[in-house]
Amino acid sequence: MLEAHNRVIHAMEGFVEQELGWLRPVPEVWQPSDFLPDFALERWPEALQALRTAAAGLSDDVLIVLVGDTVTEEALPAYQTMINRHAGMADATGASDSPWARWTRGWTAEENRHGDVLNKYLFLSGRVQMRAVELTTQHLIRNGFDPQTGNDPYKGLIYTSFQERATRVSHGNVAQVAQKSGDALLSKLCNLVAGDEARHEEAYKRFVGKLMELDPSGTVIAFAQMMKAKITMPARLMGGPGEDDLFQRFSVVAQRLGVYTAQDYVQILQHLLGFWGVPRLTGLLPEARKAQEYLCGLPAQYQRFAERLKGQRLLPAAPWQWLFGRSA
């Protein structure tokens, strides 16, 4: 099966070439220095003070979610490695001219700015214990990242489609919370990141859409297998020794704040099912028809779970090293 999937992925190279426009030319994209205080200018103290004054209004919950999102973005090396494990998409030399390799490197280059800008913002804000944040990032990269795709490019593209939409939702919601907290700069930064994620989401969804055209049965089966394995969040292994529950605690705060919730998970699944036309597919193989039926019934199951979560206090307050030991 894996060899067959890799052959289809290879046959998509012409389509991928056409979709490279979802990446922006490097001179045209934003960079962190466009928005953060410029220490080469004489008025940098005023710019820095303005940033710190606005950041002072952020709640501990917002800071926890922002740190978690930053750490997630900074584990980018693991994500590029994941894509390059898929034989049909792999960058054979590290500088290959194939469409898949150019996409992966271009995507990585754009994503690299996200952790960079958020990390610099946190450092300048003075609101979090940066060494603790940096340790979490190092733990996450060192611990690894297993999206449970089994090196199957179909599953890898489905997973990435889901995650790009999830990160768009999360960063977009943090932007709204930051705006309400009086931090217009952080709101802008998060909206910029969310805008990139939206473009990347669109490209990955189109890649999977093409798979649905070329191999509908194989793609639907892969989609069902991914959902049965559960969409594992990229930062799940962010904890160091004695911090096995760190990601769970971060997720609870995100749910409480409304930044990324079980309801968002449901809506993402519903969107992808509709975008790829899964309920309307016909002529599927018997195994694929079963997968189709399973997928179409999932949103209702997850909706019931999301309803049960509402109003629940899942974990007691506990100290956060990110917050200088304050409890939240």
Image: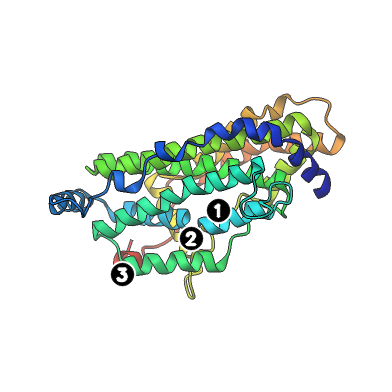
Q: Amino acid at mark 1?
A: Met
- Identify the residue at horizontal 70%, vertical 37% (top origin): 13
Rounded to the nearest angstrom, the CA distance separating label 1 from label 3 is 25 Å
Residue of label 3: 325
- Label 1: how many Cα within 10 Å (few below 14, some 14–19, many 20+): some
* Residue 237 visible in the picture: yes
Residue named by callout 1:
233
Disc with the residue nearer the chain's start (1 vs 3): 1
- Residue type at the position of mark 3: Gly
Quadrant, the C terminus = bottom left
As drawn, 308 above or below 282: below
Position of 278 with respect to 183 (left or right) is right
Q: Amino acid at mark 2?
A: Phe
Give the side of residue 97 with respect to residue 259, left or right: right
Q: Secondary structure at mark 1?
A: loop
Q: Residues within 10 Å of mark 3 (few under 14, many from 20)?
A: few
Badge 3 element: loop
